[in-house]
Amino acid sequence: MKRRLQGMGMTSRRTRERMISRLRQQGIGNGKVLAVMSEIPRHVFVDEALESRAYEDTALPIGHNQTISQPYIVAKMTALLMQNRALGKVLEIGTGCGYQTAILAKLAEQVYSVERIAPLMKKARDLLWELDIKTVGFKHSDGGWGWPEHAPYDSILAAAAPSEIPEALLQQLAVGGVMVIPIGTETRQELHRITRSEDGFIDEIIEPVTFVPFLSGVSH
Ligand code: SAH
């Protein structure tokens, strides 16, 4: 890992800048999100064999049948949560390799991240520590339960798609809070932004997306 962090020279910075201009062309206008994505090395979150593809706008395998979300989706979800507001205290469901977690950590007051596959959670936790990102709480659990001890959350981001929103996540969203979550079947999903007001929940459908399924239970 040390070598990979040190080997992060001009080439990868240039490649990262290309990723940023592509995100701008794709309609991501939030300067804070783009600045953080240009700062965090994405290649250290994937296997060495895939490093050269880390800045392509694609999901890549991270083992255990899971994928690192494509840069556009990471940027889009973060920007949706930050529209006209601060992230505040964030709950993330589906840590995966921890790339989205790192982006959130740079922008939020506090991040709590839940992952159901233990080895993924541990790897992400160690990597973020090495990147000197030390403000994230990690939990090995089924995110369908949320993380009640730290609720309510100002922002909730789910990186896996349930067929409907788990009740616990709605309950753990603060009044005035915002959740972005893909909802649908394995083949057809839409990204939703749910805003909690005094009188209930506002549900906006943003665009069609493809995520891995939201699974229940944990894996060791
Ligand atoms: N943002 C992550 C996405 C990883 S893919 C990244 O870029 O790496 C989605 C992740 O959600 C997977 O790691 C999967 O194990 C996890 N996941 C799926 N259902 C879950 C659940 N019920 N609770 C917690 N994590 C879940």
Image: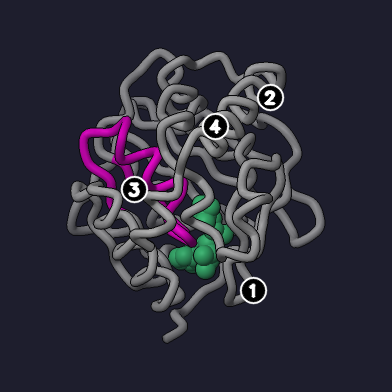
> Residue 46, percent across and down?
55, 59
Picture layout, residue 160 above or below residue 63: above
Q: Are marks 2 and 3 in contact (CB under 8 Å)?
A: no
Provide the secondary structure element on which disc 2 rests: helix
Observer-side mark, 3 or 4, equals 4
Q: In which quadrant of the rendered view does residue 36 lie? A: top left
The answer to if 27 sits in the magenta stretch is no
The answer to if 109 sits in the magenta stretch is yes
- The numbered mark, 4 or 1, whose residue comes first in the sequence reads 1
Task: Compute the Cα span from label 1 to label 3.
Answer: 23 Å
Task: Compute the Cα span from label 2 to label 3.
Answer: 28 Å
- The numbered mark, 2 or 1, whose residue comes first in the sequence reads 2
Q: Amino acid at mark 1?
A: Asn
Provide the secondary structure element on which disc 3 rests: strand
Q: Are marks 4 and 1 in contact (CB under 8 Å)?
A: no
Q: Amino acid at mark 2?
A: Arg
Residue highlighted by disc 1: 65
Residue highlighted by disc 2: 22
Q: In which quadrant of the rendered view does residue 123 lie? A: bottom left
What span is in magenta? 90-112
Q: Nearer the viewer, residue 126 or 189?
A: 126
Q: In which quadrant of the rendered view does residue 140 lie? A: bottom left
Q: Are marks 2 and 4 in contact (CB under 8 Å)?
A: no
- Circle 4 Cα neighbour tier, 10 Å, few/some/many (<14 / 14–19 / ≥20): many
Residue highlighted by disc 4: 75
Residue found 66% across the figure and 29% down from its top? 206
Task: Compute the Cα span from label 4 to label 1.
Answer: 23 Å
Provide the secondary structure element on which disc 4 rests: helix
